[in-house]
Amino acid sequence: MTLLITIFAAIASTIFWYRFDKRKEYALSALLYMFWGATLMWLIDSIVSFAKEGSAFFMPEAGETLEETVIHQQVFFYNQMNDLYLGFAVIALALIIWVIILLIKDPKHLYRKTAK
């Protein structure tokens, strides 16, 4: 789930960077690098997990009784929700860092007045 979220964020930031950051004043490239770095990190994590677990990486384990199966599905659902929250937290953190970069760079000169 985190891999999919960061892939979509990386693709969206790449489109925005290509379309709107001609003069490089909004530092969209920093946002782009953060999202592609997170995507690469989770891609490598998925590849290593798949190499260790094989096809079991894609399938939740089923219990022998109905109760064990239901409990396992609940745990699987909660783990997916944790991954969803983690993905959105990574996007929020990257956006916060990008806003700090923008505040330091001050492309509209709102905080630092230019000498005339």
Image (cartoon, helix red, strand yellow):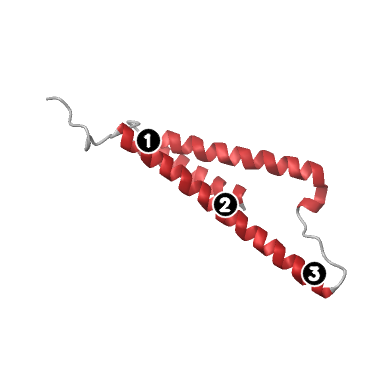
CA separation, marks 1 and 3? 48 Å
Which residue is found at the position 61% from the left and 57% from the top? 82
Q: Position of residue 9 (x, y in %)?
A: 50, 47
Q: Secondary structure at mark 3?
A: helix
CB under 8 Å between callouts 2 and 3? no
Taking depth in this image into account, of 24 and 87 the one nearest to the observer is 87
> Is 67 situated left or right of 89 in this image?
right
CB under 8 Å between callouts 1 and 2? no
Compare marks 2 and 3 and give the one earlier in the sequence: 3
Circle on res. 17: none
> Is 29 situated left or right of 80 in this image?
left
Q: Secondary structure at mark 2?
A: helix
Circle on res. 69: 3
Q: Which residue is mark 2?
A: 86
CA separation, marks 2 and 3? 26 Å
Identified by mark 3, the residue type is Thr
How many marks do you count on the picture?
A: 3
Circle on res. 101: 1
Identified by mark 2, the residue type is Leu
> Is 16 situated left or right of 72 in this image?
left
Q: Secondary structure at mark 1?
A: helix
Identified by mark 1, the residue type is Ile
Quadrant (top left/top right/bottom left/bottom right) for the C terminus: top left
Compare marks 1 and 2 and give the one earlier in the sequence: 2
**Quarter where residue 98 is shown:** top left
Count residues near mark 2 (Cα–Cα under 10 Å), then give few for <14, some for 14-19, many for 20+.
Answer: some
Count residues near mark 1 (Cα–Cα under 10 Å), then give few for <14, some for 14-19, many for 20+.
Answer: some
